[in-house]
Image (cartoon, coloured by chain):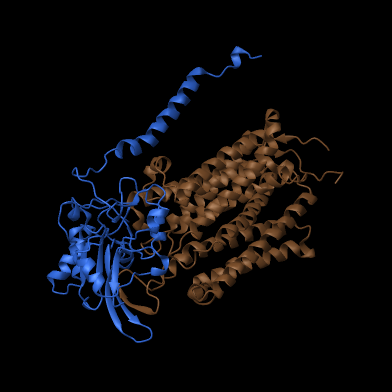
Chain colours: A brown, B blue
Amino acid sequence: MEKINYRELGCESPRFWTGMGVMAFLILLALVAVYHMEHNGHYVTGMTNQVVWGLPHVFAIFLIVAASGALNVASIGSVFGGPMYKPLGRFSSILAVALLAGGLMVLVLDLGRPDRLIIAMTKYNFKSIFAWNIYLYTGFFVIVGLYMWAMIDRKGSKMYRPLGITAFLWRLALTTGTGSIFGFLVAREAYDAAVMAPMFIIMSFSYGLAFFIITLMAAYWWDDRHIGDLRIAKLRKLLGVFVAAVLYFALVYHLTNLYITQHHGIESFVLLEGGVYTKMFWIGQVLIGGIIPLFLIYSPAFSTSRFAILAASFMVLLGGFFQVYIIVIGGQAFPMTMFPGKEVIESSFFDGVVSSYIPTVSEAMLGVGGIVVAMTIVAVVARMFPMLPDSLEDPDNI
Amino acid sequence: MSDCKQQPDMKRREFLSNTVVAAGAVTVAPGVLLTTTEAKADGKGVSSNTRWGMLIDTNKCADGCTSCVSACDKENGIDLVKKPEGHDDAMWEQQRPQWIRKVKLRDTQSSVVSNLPLMCQHCEHPPCVDVCPTGASFKRADGIVMVDRHICIGCRYCMMACPYKARSFIHADVAEQVVNSPRGKGCVESCNLCAHRLDAGQGNTACAEACAKDGHNAIVFGDLKDPNSAVSKALKSQPSRQLREDLMLNTGVRYTNV
């Protein structure tokens, strides 16, 4: 097998600096938004006592889910012995760490008291899946950091496989933890389902790989390097499998709910009568996030089109964003059934009615800031360390 | 082999380490220094021999009466939380804190209308306590579920978990407050069965008192573990139920005729 040379991303290209400049500006906007929301309080956001988690949580959960999935390419290389994926391991790891950092930043900056972050790190209630997640997230940084070291430093080569396996198992635990944030909420009909955890894992496979494909192609474009057709084809096919699996899990989730009479309300809300949420489900999640990408991936007409795979990846991310939006916001907007067999005629606290939520620009700016922070980390680290193979031309002997 | 000239500039290294230490101190200090003051009980702690709870008779709860709500608002300084200037009224309605609210229901089969006050149900197994990452949401030995606002980080996971939507997040700065119920922007709070009154030896909540004063007596408050308490006797004398009893939370607040 030929030797792979890794090289830092060059910064001579004006594309690199223009990109960095745009990202710095977007991060600045996110900071302004945070200052606005934290200084005034959450009343300036669209969040209320009815919809308590808003757009920032959609972005945060989306990024955290994608983060663990972005590590898959590395895992396939080291755990499952895929030679075509192995050279991409370093980049996959840094992307995973960066996406997690971006997601956590959004989550923390949306807290009512972000200044009390130290309390979240020193006081734990171990019955809370949130508290477990704090360990799972910090552990992920440490383990993937060591994994990266094992990939880069010759001294660490002995540890490469054990660390690869540990990182793979850890990422499964991490996404299980993220899915369980909702799976353990017995009160709300949209949640309280064990399938949430494996569904989040398969969502992470799909979103993570879509992020990976986009950032990899962007990095090689920035630096005028070339990726071989065979590698692109492999990634494309893998994405196809993941996208189909996400659709399958969505189907299982909804079919299960449709079987349970108690959950018919939330199902007709999401699938038929939920207005914006119904549109997001059918047009956003199913069509944009599932059917069109599958067509772009499997249609022979686009089999060699790089634009098609890039478009499919973007659509997977967009559809995934809608999917998380429906889970987080739709699940809260739908009223809880507190009084079965009764209808609420009057309540000052909006019992029994669908809650409205209109996100504000600041919330969106903070969320976008999370994505941009992740991308900036990737760009800076790939600039400083040899993360990407000099060339990703197809090997001759495969 | 290293060349001395290639050694890093020590001043720069010192500057960097000092910066890291200073940044660390700035991050850590507020949490450590501002949260060391623990609330102190007056020598006597609360005991698990008591479990505070209430029985609400919806037949006695009068349509249109909001005495319990007003009394709670006054007792706990909720009426002092003002809408930020220029803020949208409809939006503020959904953002202002409410510890207790009146709900009017109609039976879908019989069309019978009932009224009831709804607040934190003080579960024996509270989901809000289970999910709170820091332990800020806690249950006292005497069954009162409340928020330690010194360690609440404002994540709102408890609000997601509560089956009764009993919790409120403080969305804006609070200018005025009452001594017995301190509150701050960015924390979550809910009914604490007027814990300050109970700790001071007053055996009743503001809502139950107001309801009795108006002659309705829809709320009977007391110690569920004391067989001679009014609430225990009332519970024995008529069938009652918990809201969302399917969740098996064993609530401290019970309802009759709903």
Residue found farthest to the bottom: B110
Q: Can residue A53 be seen in the rendering of this structure?
A: yes
Residue drawn at (38%, 69%), measured in percent from left and top? B244
Q: Can residue A29 be seen in the rendering of this structure?
A: no
Residue drawn at (46%, 21%), measured in percent from left and top? B14
Q: Tell me if B217 is positioned left or right of A163 in this view.
A: left
Residue drawn at (18%, 44%), measured in percent from left and top? B42
Residue found farthest to the top: B4
Q: Which of the pair A58/A82 is nearer the observer?
A: A82
Q: Name which quarter of the figure residue A139 lies in.
A: top right
Q: Tell me if B145 is positioned left or right of A163 in this view.
A: left
Q: Tell me if B218 is positioned left or right of A270 in this view.
A: left
Q: Which of the pair B138/B256 is nearer the observer?
A: B256
Residue drawn at (41%, 63%), measured in percent from left and top? A51
Q: At which x and y percent is residue B134?
A: 39, 47
Say if A202 sits above or below A90 in the image: below
Q: At which x and y percent is residue A31?
A: 44, 46
Quarter of the picture containing the N terminus of chain A is top right
Q: Name which quarter of the figure residue B58 lies in.
A: bottom left
Q: At which x and y percent is residue A304?
A: 79, 57
Q: At which x and y percent is residue B132?
A: 40, 52
Residue found farthest to the right: A397
Q: Which of the pair A85/B72 is nearer the observer?
A: B72
